Image (cartoon, helix red, strand yellow):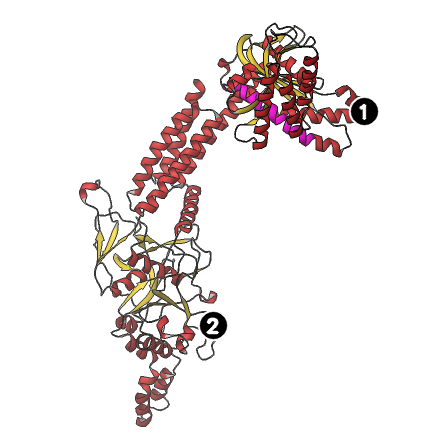
Amino acid sequence: MKQHVIRIALGLVVVLVFLGHAARVYQIGFITQVDNIIYDARLRFTMPDVVDDRIVILDIDEKSLAVPELGRWPWGRDRVASLIQKLFDKYGVVIIGFDVVFAEPDASSGLKVLEQLAKKEFAGNSQFAQTINQLRPQLDHDGAFARVMKGRPVVLGYYFNSDEDARESGALPEPVLPAGTFAGRNIGFTTWRGFGGNLTEFQASAASAGHFNPFVDFDGVSRRIPLLAEYKGKYYEALSLAMVRVLLNGPKVEPGYPPEKFTTKGYAGLEWLEVGPLKIPVDETVSAFVPFRGKRGSYPYISLADVYFDKVAPEKLKGKIALIGTSAPGLLDLRSTPVSSVYPGVEMHANMIAGMLDRTIKQKPSYMLGAEVALIILGGVALALVVPFLSPLRAVLLSALAIVLFTGINLGIWSGAGMILPLATALLMTVALFTINMAYGYFIESRSKRQFTELFGQYVPPELVDKMAQDPEKYSMEGRKENLTVLFSDVRGFTTISESLEPAELAQFINGYLTSMSLVIRNNRGTLDKYIGDAIMAFWGAPVADPEHARQGVITALMMQEELKNLQRDFKARGWPDIKIGIGVNSGDMTVGDMGSQVRRAYTVMGDAVNLGSRLEGITKQYGVGILVGEETRKVVSDVLFREIDKVRVKGKDEPVTIYEPIGIEGQVEKGRLEEIKLWHAALKLYRAQQWDQAELQMMNLQRMNPDCHLYEIYAGKIVEHRAHPPGEDWDGVTKFETK
C-alpha cells in the first residue's frame, strides 16, 4: 500500500503542474505547441475542402507582374482606377476589398515635374500654365483613383505595426468603437505602436478600410485575425469585418456579453461582436479563428492582368465579392497557416468573410478556460487515484480510454457546439500520469520484483514471474491440489533421427524443434515444466490461475501440430529427416508445487491425471493420430470438435478412460471432414455392438474417403481379429494397454 500512496502523491503533483498551465498561471511552451499541432490537425480533418465561388481573388500574380504594359507593382493609379471602374461597370462585382496599401502618391504621370517647371523655368508663361490645367485631370492619377472609388463599395486595407521605431504614415479610417468603450473590462486586445495607412484622399473616398494584420502565434503560424485592434485607446476593425459591414449596408459593431447571471465577478466577458444580423464569436484577444475551407485555392483565383485586358468571362465575376491581393512571392504576402506553410494572406481574408456570412467561425470564449480546468481536475484526479492500483496492461487500457474520452469530448464540442477546447493539456497529462506510474514501477518496484525473481525464478517459467511479482502474496510454492491440464509431447523415432545426423546438426535439429514448440506453449499462457530429451512437459492453471486451462491445452496441441508442418518444410530444405510428434493432453486434480531434493528442485505437477497425460502421448502412435485427449479435458472444452477414438485401460489404472482426438475449432472444420467424422462415429458404434460386417463396410468407406488415415486401417485389423476370436457378450469395448 505504501507504494500506492507514493504513486498517488506523484500523480497529484503532475495534475497540479498541468492545472497551472490550463489555468494560465504560467505557460509551458511545449504544451502550447502540441495544442497548436492538434488544432491544426483537427481543422484539416474537419474542413469542407470545397471551392466557394461567392468570393473571387483577383491575383497580382507573377503573370500580372510580367506584363510589360502593367509593369512591376505598384501599378499606376490610372490603371488601378480603370480596373475598379471595369470591375463594377462591366463585370458587376458587388464589392471590392484591397489587401494592399496605397501609401505613397503616384508620380508616374510627370504632373509634379510639370508643376515645378511652371513655377520656375516657365514662370509667368500663362499658356504653359493653362495647358497644365487642361491636362491635370488626365495626369492626376491619384485624383482619378479617388474619384472612381467615390460612392462605390470599395474597402481599402492598411496595416498596424509594433516595431520599436514604429511610425504613423497615411490616414486611418474612423474607429468602429471609440475610446472608453471597454472601460473597466480586462480584455486582451492586440495593441500597436504605429500604422501604415492609405493616402488621406483615398481614405476619404473609400467606403471603408480595415487592417489586414493576422495574429501570429509563437510558432510563426497564423490561425486567427484580430477583428478589433486597439490603437491609442480606439478600436479598429479588420479588413474582412469592414467588407462584411459594407455588404450589410454599414451596421454598427456592438460588443456581445453574456447575461450577468451566467458570469462571475471580474469576468471580462466579451464573447462575440454583433454586426447587424450576424453574431461573430471572438476569443480572449478579440480575435476570430480563420475557418479555412481547405488548402490554397478554396476560392477562385483570377489573374488581375486577365481582368485588365478583358480576358475574363463576365459571368465569372458578376455578383461576386472581389478581393485584390497577391500570391507572388516577391510581394511578401505569403503566410504560414494550419493548412499550408505557404498561403496567400488575401485568401485568409476570403475565409473570414465566408465564415462570417455562413456563421461557421469556431468559438473560443474566455469561459472555455474554466471548462478546461474542470476537465483537468476531474480527469486528472481520477487517473491519479486509480492508475497506481492497476496492472500495466490495465493501466494502458485505462489511459487509452481516458485519451479516447478526452478526444471524443473535445471533438464533440468542436463539431456539435462549434467551440474550441484545448486538448493537449489533457492528453499530455494522461501520458505523464501513465509514464510516472510505469517509471515508478520499473525503477522502484522492480527491485522487489528482482528479489521475487531470484527466489522463484528457478521454479517458475520467466514469462509468468512478472505477473506473479505484481502481487507476490497471492502465490506460494508450497504443494497444493489444483484442477489443472497437463501436456506431454514426444518426437516419434527420435533415436533413428539422432543416428542419421552429425552432432552439430542434431543440436540444431533439437534446438529448432524445442524452440518452436516452446514458443507455441508460451504464447498460449502455458507453464513449461521441463524437457526430457526430445520430450516436452507443460501445464496450465498454475502458478497463475486460468479458468480455461483445459481449452488452452487443447488449442496448444493443435497449434503445435500446425507449427510442425512449418518445421517439416524447413527441415526438408536442410536435408534433415522427417519429423512427427505425438501429444497427450489430460485434465484433472494434480498436486502442484516446489518438489525435488536438497540437490535440485523444480516447480512441477504430479498425480494420476499427470500419469494419464503421459500415457496418452505414448499411445498416439497405436492409433495413428497426432493428439489424444482425456475425457476430463473433453468434458470442459465446448468449442472444439473432437473425434472419439477408443475406450482404453492404461497400465496402472483400473478404470477405463474414453480418449478423443481434437480436430479443430467448431465452425472452422471443412464440411467434408465433418461428414467423415459423423461416419466414423457410426462405424465405432457398430464396432462396439460387434456388428463386424457392417462395421467393416463402414471402415472400407472411410478408407476410401481418407486413405491417409491410419486409424481406419487399425480398426479394420481389429475387426478381422475380433471376427476370428469373438470377445464375448460381456465385452465392454475397452482396449487394454499393458505397457507404459
Q: Please give the name of the residue rendered at 43% of the width and 37% of the height, measured from the top-left corner.
A: 428
Q: Which of marks 2 and 1 is in front?
A: 1
Query: Gap in Å between the C-alphas at discs 2 and 1?
Result: 83 Å
Q: Can residue 373 be found in the magenta stretch?
A: no
Q: In this view, does 276 lie to the left or right of 596?
A: left
Q: Can residue 545 be found in the magenta stretch?
A: yes
Highlighted magenta segment, given as a residue range: 542-567
Give the residue type that dot 1 points to: Ser
Q: Please give the name of the residue rendered at 63% of the width and 7% of the height, measured from the top-left corner.
A: 728
Q: Mostly what secondary structure, the magenta segment?
A: helix
Residue 712 in picture, x, y percent from top left: 66, 22
Figure quadrant of residue 243: bottom left
Q: Label 2: few (<14), some or many (≥20) within 10 Å? A: few
Q: Label 1: few (<14), some or many (≥20) within 10 Å? A: few
Residue 8 in picture, x, y percent from top left: 41, 25
Q: Which of 451 and 173 is in front in this view?
A: 451
Residue 103 makes an appearance in the image: no
Give the residue type that dot 2 points to: Lys
Residue 45 in picture, x, y percent from top left: 42, 49
Q: Are marks 2 and 1 in contact (CB under 8 Å)?
A: no
Residue identified by numbered label 2: 63
Q: The N terminus appears in which quarter of the rendering?
A: top left
Q: Nearer the viewer, residue 437 or 351?
A: 351
228 lies above or below 601: below
**Figure disc tally:** 2
Residue 345 in picture, x, y percent from top left: 40, 61
176 lies above or below 631: below
- Disc number for residue 500: 1
Q: Please give the name of the residue rendered at 38% of the width and 59% of the height, measured from the top-left corner.
A: 348
